[in-house]
Image: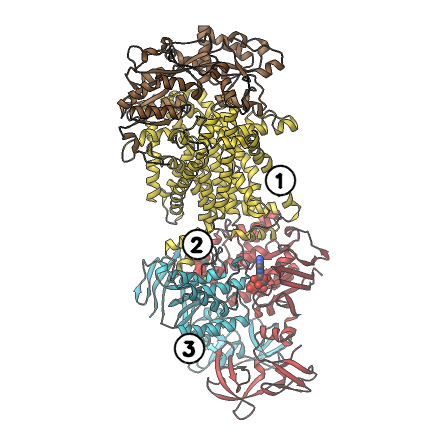
Chain colours: A yellow, B brown, C red, D cyan
Amino acid sequence: MAGPVAFFAVFFAYPVVAIVGRGLKDGDGWHLARIGQVLADPGVRHVLWFTTWQALVSTALTLLIALPGAYVFARLDFPGKQVLRAVVTVPFVLPTVVVGTAFLALAGRGGLLDELWGVRLDTTVWAILLAHVFFNYAVVVRTVGGLWAQLDPRQEEAARMLGASRPAAWRTITLPALAPAVAAAALMVFLFTFTSFGVVQILGGPTFATLEVEIYRQTADVFDLSTAAVLTMIQFVAVGAILAVHAWTVRRRETALRLVDASLTARRPRGAGQWALLAGVLVTVAVLLVLPLAVLVERSLDAPGFASYRALTSADSGVFLVPPIEAIGTSLQYAVVATAIAVVIGGLAATALTRRDAGRLVRGFDALLMLPLGVSAVTVGFGFLIALDQPPLDLRSAWILVPLAQALVGVPFVVRTMLPVLRAVDTRLREAAAVLGASPWRVWREVDLPLVRRALLVAAGFAFAVSLGEFGATVFIARPDNPTLPVAVARLLGRPGETNYGQAMALSTILMVVCAVALLVLERLRTDRTGEF
Amino acid sequence: SSGGGGESGDSRTVTLVSHDSWAASKEVIAAFEKESGYRVRVLKDGDAGQAVNKAILTKDNPQGDVLFGVDNTLLSRALDNGLFQPYEAKDADRVRPEYRADQDRHRVTPVDTGDICVNYDKEWFSEHKLTPPASFDDLIEPRYKNLLVTENAATSSPGLGFLLGTAARYGDGWPEYWKKLKANGVKVVDGWEQAYNEEFSGSAAGRKAKADRPLVVSYASSPPAEVIYADPRPDTAPTGIAPGTCFRQVEYAGLLNNARNPEGGKALLDFLIGKRFQDDMPLNMFVYPVRDDAKVPADFARFGPQAENPQTMDPDEIAGHRDEWVKSWTSLVLK
Amino acid sequence: MLLSLRGATVRFGGRAVLDAVDLDVAEHEIVCVLGPSGSGKSTLLRAVAGLQPLDAGAVLLGGRDQAGVPAHRREVGLMFQDHQLFPQRDVGGNVAFGLRTRGVPRAERSERVAELLELVGLPGAARRAVAALSGGEQQRVALARALAPRPRLLMLDEPLGQLDRSLRERLVVELRELFGRLGTTVLAVTHDQGEAFALADRVVVMREGRIAQSGTPLEVWQRPADAFVARFLGFENVVEAAVTGQAADTPWGKVPVPEDAPQGARSLLVRPAGVRLVPVGEGLRCTVAARTFRGTHVAVRLQPGDAPPLEAACALRSAPETGDEVGVEFDPAEIVVLG
Amino acid sequence: MLLSLRGATVRFGGRAVLDAVDLDVAEHEIVCVLGPSGSGKSTLLRAVAGLQPLDAGAVLLGGRDQAGVPAHRREVGLMFQDHQLFPQRDVGGNVAFGLRTRGVPRAERSERVAELLELVGLPGAARRAVAALSGGEQQRVALARALAPRPRLLMLDEPLGQLDRSLRERLVVELRELFGRLGTTVLAVTHDQGEAFALADRVVVMREGRIAQSGTPLEVWQRPADAFVARFLGFENVVEAAVTGQAADTPWGKVPVPEDAPQGARSLLVRPAGVRLVPVGEGLRCTVAARTFRGTHVAVRLQPGDAPPLEAACALRSAPETGDEVGVEFDPAEIVVLG
Ligand SMILES: Nc1ncnc2c1ncn2[C@@H]1O[C@H](COP(=O)(O)OP(=O)(O)OP(=O)(O)O)[C@@H](O)[C@H]1O
Ligand SMILES: Nc1ncnc2c1ncn2[C@@H]1O[C@H](COP(=O)(O)OP(=O)(O)OP(=O)(O)O)[C@@H](O)[C@H]1O
Ligand SMILES: [Mg+2]
Ligand SMILES: [Mg+2]
């Protein structure tokens, strides 16, 4: 527990407090009157209202569309499942600028919907909502699916023997068992959409703004730190309230569940219903996720003879000090380190939180861990700049700062994905190991770990993807000679000209491939399940 | 490739903090390093505005020695926050007088200049047998209805530049002008990337995205970039600029307060307005030099001539009105 | 027939776990399925319930083929061997589950729940969490849950296996009475022969996915179909023998067999009660190898030279000590020539 | 004493589930705990294992108080009533688990696993997934897993409850033999008296968290401590009686009792074998209310007027039919005047 607490104190609380304090401090006095002024601003209220409802709707929509996906990925076997599961995570890593482009190709002018039905969503709030689904589909599929695959299917059978139809059995038995995972996923989606930045900025134009966008504008563009600080605090309060509600609802639902080996629960689809569901999910994934991504690939191949890709290997364009292709190495390196940090810190925290004797304080820390998802990246980035500038923590120009910032976002993922599973593990299973002579550490390694292995890999995948795609904080701290892929893409897009654009698309494509391959490799990692005796 | 953070303390290294658009030829930098004996480290810190803001936040313990990339729209923010220490660069007298600023204290040195202008899609206008607009006045003509896309003046540097251009042109009457512009269907998006890549039909990206606005607020240097960054290069630029819609930006550099290596910083400032760098600059950063004897490459001048009579505004005036204008602009145009 | 299986076959990875099983269960009949662990009893129930698709054959309920009919439409009840109580619901919620899916009104529901909890000996336990129940209590809740919706065909997988004898005996009586009253048809799996004999109208003995014997408890006990069934019922004195007329040649020497016994090479069963101890010198000479107290009697293990050992049942008072030498005679009334 | 409990008490929500239990288990002893469902048997084992903290009292192992010693340091083995197999490990991985934590080398491990799987009748099952096992197979894997590390004190919670009779009888014999060879001390919970009598050196009968009786199987069977124990053992002929000399006044009339029986108001047990059927007119007049086939005998339920019913054990051939009128006489040798 001490590890995660220290980590959060130093790399999150301290910088954020520093930057907020800076905004609210006026010479030696405090600027508290600003709070009232900002709150009274109808513009700010409108932003708060928009932020909240679009997040609610996005979350509901995402759950609605992604839960069938979670089922299909958890319980049905079909060829290409692993690849597809990696693919749905790809949107996560893409810089929002690129996603905007991709998404407009689906729902914008001349996009698929336009050509088929003449429907254009790019100027409506629907574009934002759908893009949120696009982004967060994987969150639901992976967090919920991770637990779902391990639920004993016989529970549902028992319900059906008592006269419940398949949907009824699902609703009355599986859903309550999944509730903590669904709540965790919903929480994450809500936090992501509540603090949505890129999507809203690009698809919403200047008319729609979330708090996060407003904070960004106030900090980075207008440089009105006091307004930004107040907004940050509003966001803090809102996020804190959400976390409290979540903690309260989830705690009452967590029960030990009968977990089984996930590899035994997936079956080939049977019956028209399952085939229809599978088809539906595949079509959804194809239209909502694959198609926008394909547009990027297509555009990267526009220049004949892979010219865009070949151009990446030269440093001539002047945008970079090194060939853009080297961004892959940098990104991977950062992502690996960030993932490691996130997994270690998040794993420690999740384990501490599962302990039966975990007190109030520890549980409170649970909510605290989620806060990084609710705090603007720019706030954290600026916070790092002013807080971590003195030895021994003069990290501003140290490369480790980037993975640290990225890990901050990864940790909540790790905790949220692992907790529902860890809490579902029947204590008696641990007891069984203890009476067989296993020490607590060994129990964790031999009983919990194999059961959460899947969740852990999912979480690690997320942490990896988040880190690979993180832009907001990275752009503030990444060093120019080592841009990450998203930073490189953004720089290329920041200049006119066909080859720049082509390279940006090529680099985005590479980013997608890197992400998908990394996730696939990660999912293949298996702690040897059987050969242990 | 991931060394530690100790480099900045080294007195043989001079650190330049800049924005993402910074670029220079390797040979030119190498030559400077060789002559001066300093190693140059560059920190790119987001876009121009962010670079300045970060510099302000870290002014007690700056990340580098020299900040390059403060333009006239933001200059007051930098100066008011006491970012720079005075230094008059060698050859400062070779800078064209109209670009000089802060003459009494010499806290900043002008380095380059560029114009923010409305760009048009040549093909679209010839297809539609329409003459492209030439001036601010043209833009509110009904025949150009629903053709222009610009950027949010609150969040985007060209957006702000365009606003300042109209303010310079119409004085206190600029809100009237914008009302008409709005009535004429101007579209406002948040950033340049979107405007140029997603909405403007003349750019390479916009063509792919089936963009439908043939007019965009961008830079005078965008047309040459469309030529230079194309493979194969076309003979003429696919886009042009509306000459009467330009606003001139000047970018400055200055020696940061509390710089660890002030001597190196001074040498770097000298270098930035030295002839070699000024000659090299246009094709790297798509800007014009400020030195009166700098040579602009022929290609660059051919596809992207500097505007003849751009709107300009004194940094002091910008400082005095910027926030207020942006605020009224926001409620006028966005609400 | 309420339930008919026709050549029902289930394979797991090539191995037939149900192997062309034919079985008929009449309306109101109570059938117990017996068989060694792993012989396919649970699989049989799951196949009938529609939880386990058949690889061949058919399940008919009320004469209608159930292929494609989903589990919840078959109107059968199943109590799982491992209970599968719903951990998120309390005891009452578990028992009431099947009533809720059938839309039984709330008042009736809670009345029925209370009744059933009373029946299984857990009165007033409705609000308890299932995780805080003892093993036997969980089993009783599972039983109550399966009983609650009163399905026409109720299948019970080891319903009383974790209960102590007195409770089990009471429940057997009450369940029989209940099933009789409601007209429920029952297919129950049990490993306990006493329970099967007490509960069942008919028992079915399974062996490796096939039905080895089916009949009334008395029939099966008195005339096991073959050596397997005999051994499964706990008889140890089973040997190969050559039967000729009223006598059989066995490793224990000549043994009398009942009249009209099948002739030739056969398996032969001597019930422990048919092994009569006589003074040494008379009959087959044996050494007492072991004696086990069995409550009502003592099981004595006899070693006759190097022939297979013999088990005898003796009253406690007359049982010899380990190491004693005794003589053995056989009672033809307790000898069965099998199959 | 290898294991001693001193006033061990466990409360759940105010209710004492273990109520000041004192129990001693000597080295190499095999003790079976019997008791109704919910009487605290599993809780007792969990308390000894260190999984259930005591509210009062102490657990001593080898004379040392175990307060504060975590479960994995107590070097006791526990087989759980609901098995708790590790779902993500195969059968071999489960069985080998305790060997791995003790650092047994790989070769020895797989040899021991193979041996144990052979013992429990699952040879070659090491690579199978535990979820694909039948109920009884899972139980056997759990048993093998508990046996593998050869703990000094092995606790088994219903180890053979889901197995059929022949397998169980074989296992009881082999386990006794194994425990004897290894010198293992065993504390086992079972609801099956047959199993307890066959396995145990001593049985302990629990009732609502207290020990109702403790003694050798024969002692407990022959002289149940009280009416509860007698009823628990399945005896139904238990009534209140006033004993005077060699006779007792019961609802069934005067009944002879053995010599030196305790005198006064007592509970009186008539074993079914002590209820002898005689022609109507002689003895107590009864109607045959029911008869249940019990394998070795027929249990006949007799209704003597409005006195409590009587259970008699008859040979199959001589058992009366339901509805018959019979006379009943009592055999003092099968009558016990309780505590
Ligand atoms: N965690 C718990 N919380 C509350 N009550 C409990 C808990 N665990 C057990 N009990 C109760 O304590 C009593 C004894 O439980 P225990 O499991 O020891 O019974 P048992 O003798 O093993 O019964 P069985 O033969 O049915 O397994 C039961 O009534 C049970 O409901
Ligand atoms: N899902 C499965 N995959 C592979 N084999 C299985 C599966 N389920 C059951 N089996 C095997 O099929 C056989 C029959 O299983 P079943 O559960 O029907 O046995 P059972 O007669 O109920 O045994 P028990 O009395 O032990 O419960 C067993 O050998 C079991 O291992
Ligand atoms: Mg079974
Ligand atoms: Mg128990």
User: Residue at the location (54% across, 63% down)?
Assistant: C160
Residue marked by disc 2? A447
Q: Which chain does the residue under circle 3 lie in?
A: D
Q: Where residue B238 appears, x then y in whole percent?
A: 55, 18
Query: Against A126, is D317 above or below?
Result: below
Q: Between residues D149 and A102, which one lies in front from this camera angle?
A: A102
Q: Which chain does the residue under circle 1 lie in?
A: A
* Residue D287 left/right relative to A514: right
> Which quadrant does the C terminus of chain A fall into?
bottom left
Q: Amino acid at mark 1?
A: Gly
Residue marked by disc 1? A280
Residue extending farthest to the bottom is C281
User: Residue at the location (44% across, 81% down)?
Assistant: D245
Could you tell me which secondary element the residue under label 3 belongs to?
loop
Could you tell me which secondary element the residue under label 1 belongs to?
helix
Q: How many C-alpha atoms fall within 10 Å of the one at disc 3: few (<14), some, or many (≥20)?
A: some
* Residue B191 left/right relative to D320: left
Query: Against A40, is D233 above or below?
Result: below
Q: How many C-alpha atoms fall within 10 Å of the one at disc 2: few (<14), some, or many (≥20)?
A: many
Of circles 1 and 3, which is in front? 1
User: Residue at the location (32% across, 13% down)?
Assistant: B92
Q: Amino acid at mark 2?
A: Val
Q: Work out whether disc 1 and disc 3 sit on a shared chain.
A: no
For residue D263, the mark is 3
